[in-house]
Amino acid sequence: MKASNLFAGMMTATTLIASAMMVSTAVSATELTVYTAVESDDLQKYAARFNQAHPDIQIRWVRDSTGVMTARLMAEKENPRADVIWGLAATSLLLLDNEGMLHPYAPKGVEKLDPKFVDNNETPAWVGMDAWVAAICYNTIEGERQGVPMPTSWEDLTRPEYEGHVIMPNPSSSGTGYLDVASWMQLWGEDKAWDFMDKLHNNVSRYTHSGSAPCNLAGSGEAVVGVSFAFRAARLKSQGAPIEVVFPSEGLGWDMEAAAIVKGTQNLEAAKTLMDWAVSQDANELYNEGYAVVAMPGVAKPIENYPADIVERMIDNDFSWAAVNRDRILQEWTRRYDGKTEVR
Amino acid sequence: MQAATRYLYAPGRLQWLRGESAIRLLALLAALLLMLIGLALPLITMLMKSLQNSSGEFIGLANYRHYFDTPALAGSILNSLKIALISTLIVVGLAFVSAYGLTRTCMPGKKLFRMITLLPILAPSLLPAISLVYMFGNQGYLKGLLQDSSIYGPIGIVLGMCFWVFPHALMILVTALSTSDARMYEAARAMKTPQWRTFLTITLPGIRYGLISCAFVVFTLTITDFGVPKVIGGQYNLLATDIYKQVVGQQNFQMGAVVSVILLLPALFTFIADRWVQRRQTAQLSSRAVPYQPSPSPLRDWMLALFCYAIAGMILLVIGTAIYASFIHFWPYNLSFTLRHYQFDGLGGSGWESWFNSLKMAFSVAVIGTLVIFTNAWLVEKSRDFGWLRQLVHLFAILPMAVPGMVLGLAYIFFFNHPDNPLNVIYGTLTILVLNTLIHFYTVCHLTSMTALKQLDPEFESVGSSLKVPFWTTYTRVTLPVSLPAVLDISVYLFVNAMTTVSAVIFLYGPDTRLASVSVLHLDEAGYFASAAAMAVLILLTSLVVKLLHAGLSWLLLRKAQSWRQR
């Protein structure tokens, strides 16, 4: 008897859940499916600001890390599911553009952006939002405890006192890792960059699969020095991690977050509206809340944890060089450092 | 006899039989269709990529040649085999001693120990990885135990694997050790055979098939898992993490497919060997066997009890560490208590939403999956005709175990998102997540169903058909109710796995269907370790509550069945 009551209860629950699922699929205004790698704690804020200007367009986010999002977009090539990409690395968008997956569009007001931040096709395939700068996370508590001084340059990291204390992302699993490698090559030329990495490799305790992991690990004291990027460092610091953000003196590799319309979207008008807003001053002020360098000149106010002269310290990054040479560089990197991975 | 023949071949009756067997055929074809759509076709679409270049042209085995010419890539094969073998040896050893304690001794606290050893399956595989860092990482409170070695690498991978594979191994070995013939032991005692010889000549040979099949399961699970090595593996290259590197790091689907094929081979091999062993196991135990009842022996009982308690202690320590981590401010620098991490700040308010999504998904998989898998197993086991068709469905049913989740996830994108596929409407919805998860965990449910059905007397079907009852009535009125405990086991297994699965669904969730298990990964990536631990603990508790409900329900049902038998 009791068993059948329970069974009836289960059935009722099924019905309830099924009807709840139907309600949630009810349609509202225009819906845009937006693929992004923007930090998940920022998504609500981004959508809310956009909706202040355009309440009739509802953003439906799909968010994952840069690598997963890029892989997913490429895998969906035959039948794209996203309307707009808002907040994915420009290097990924270059890749998608080469596959012919982007719908070129010059958003209203794009001429106000720094040309460095806009795709140089006649009608830009993508527009940049903000820059995403390499940085070193240094754990002050562990540094003092283990007698590891705070580095000030990339070159410092090759000194003997850093042996076993450095963590960096593996460039073949992480975009941030490749950004570092590509920036060293552009700074010093390939031969010197390989020399540097040979020496760095001796000090690296391990290579991680994610670009933010080195900083996270420095924050929790698992490493003293993590090669990562400034945004993550600043966020961790505000969470209470005892870290100092170091911007190495030789120059900083960087990538940008960018936005684009996906070719074949059913909501082209709404997608254009979002793109127009994504280059607006309001949007650039929004980006400036997390990033020190944004696409529209004159908007950026200095923010906590970033040096005032950060723009001058960013290298003159040649994105297409980095994209064209990626396979070759990664193969050489893998041959040199990944193959001899040994148990420590 | 003649009368019977005439009865059977009376015109109307034959037609009716034909109608019924047509329905059987249709049902079997539907089962086959499910396996084709959910498994075979997506997998073929994915594996074809290994024979193509990046623009989709056929290039034969060139990708494979490139793979084997790159030492850094091919070296992972050895690493993977090494890790899987070491984990298998450790887990099977530990599980054997524990199972021996549970079945062949009178050690105290058996029930509690069983409960505790179940906990690891209820948690996402990221949970042990997070806990191990807190325990053995550079700031870990047990770091001293590792001396100079690092947890980030093979040691961490093996420890993490052992944690979550142990329950699977224990379940198999407990079953194997439970079915033994007490008469053999009586004979041994009568002949004054020493204990160690009894063990070597009776106990071990009696469970050798269970032992081998357990080793195969553990080996397959450890070689295909990617959750543990990604977080704690450091740069120790394994096949499973290589797929991640190729696909997510470099968007190189072709090389990802090559690694997938290579990863399928050992798994497929173990799987075939396992089938072969299973086939030889039939009729191991004669119908006259008397179940073995252990008699107390204080020294032995307490030694095994201590061994089991030590294992239970380690499991509780790992889980306790994750719970502790979810309640403190900032490890290891601010250890004050807080509930803040359960607000899931790192997810901007969608933390509980993803938990609810997971619940919906897991519940759907449990209800739909149980019915579909059990019915299909019943069609395979209890039908008489269409032998080749039943064999084919059976083969497909045991294949999913050898397919790594990430491969299945990507395969689903390529297959289901194709513009010419009429099924592409389900892409990005909860439906595709349910289908994917159902297929991903099909094998164990199928094998459990088959075991339960084999225990049922085939007379039920004969009696049913001679009473002119259509087969589906026999199924719903007799087979299903009698097998209810097994059916409930399957549904809980599906529920629990749907709550914790990550690797396949990470490529498939849509704007409205983000899952809690994926959130754990995101939180961990974004450096919110404590929130990640909190979400993992939440998943564990959810599964635990469902598991307890299940235990209560089974108890009620069994009591009901028992009273019916007594009458």
Image (tube, coloured by chain):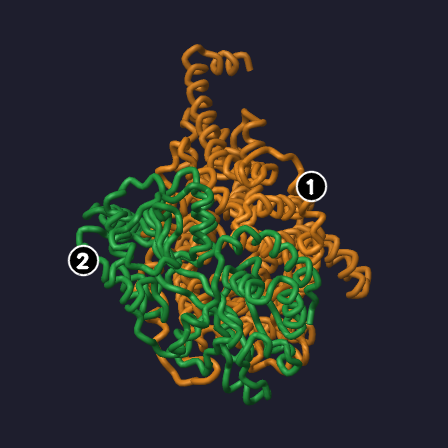
Position in image of residue A175 (x %, y %): 50, 59
User: On the rendered structure, is B244 left or right of B494?
Assistant: right
Residue for badge 2: A53
The answer to whether B46 is drawn above or below residue A284 in the figure is above
- Shown in green, the chain is A
Local packing at callout 2 (Cα closer than 10 Å; few below 14, some 14-19, many 20+) is few
Question: From this viewpoint, is residue A245 visible?
Answer: yes
Q: Which mark is residue B276?
A: 1
Count of numbered marks: 2
**Residue under disc 2 on the same chain as residue under disc 1:** no
User: In the picture shown, does residue A199 fall above or below B559?
Assistant: below
> Where on the picture, by quarter, is residue B527?
bottom left
Residue B469 picture quarter = top left
Q: Is residue A46 left or right of residue B91?
A: left
Q: Specify whether residue B207 is in view.
A: no
Q: Chain of mark 1?
A: B
**Amino acid at pointer 1:** Trp
Q: CA distance from mark 2 to mark 1?
A: 66 Å
Q: State the quadrant of the C terminus of chain A.
A: bottom right
Viewer-proximal residue, A293 or B500? A293
Q: Residues within 10 Å of mark 1 (few under 14, many from 20)?
A: few
Chain B's colour is orange
